[in-house]
Image (cartoon, helix red, strand yellow):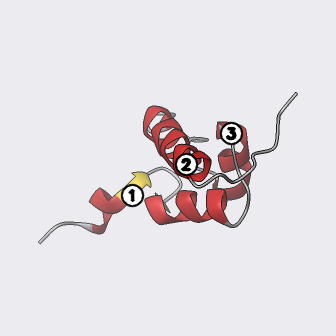
Amino acid sequence: MTSKRANYVCECKAVFRNEIVNSIKKGHAQTLLDIQNLTKASTGCGRCKNQVEWIINTELEKKRKHGLQLRLNL
């Protein structure tokens, strides 16, 4: 039996992958800072930062492939 802890992307703040994905899809998050503000992921020890950024990039690439317009952060 696997522990619940193994399912978290961010163990410090108890954030699951689907919370990050939903923040991108429904909350329109596009940056690490957006995800940090919406979910608190990667605001503790920071070990999950690379994984969170990978999820963001993967989900944004899916949006680009479907032709959805992204906002620009200037």
| The label number, if any, that marks residue 31 in the structure image | 3
In the image, what residue occupies the spot 75% across and 46% down? Answer: 70
Image x and y of residue 22, in percent: 59, 65
Towards the viewer: 70 or 3: 70
In the image, what residue occupies the spot 58% across and 55% down? Answer: 66
How dense is the environment of label 1, judged by Cα within 10 Å: few (below 14), some, or many (20 and up)? some
Task: Please state which amino acid type lies under the numbered disc 1.
Answer: Tyr
Numbered disc 1: secondary structure = strand
Task: Please state which amino acid type lies under the numbered disc 2.
Answer: Lys
Towards the viewer: 24 or 20: 24
Image x and y of residue 46, in percent: 51, 34
Of labels 1 and 2, the one closer to you: 2
Q: Tell me the quarter of the picture where residue 43 sits.
A: top right
| The label number, if any, that marks residue 27 in the structure image | none
**Quadrant housing the N terminus:** bottom left
Q: Which residue is mark 2?
A: 65
What is the C-alpha distance between the residues marked 2 and 3?
Answer: 18 Å
Image x and y of residue 2, in percent: 17, 67
| The label number, if any, that marks residue 8 in the structure image | 1
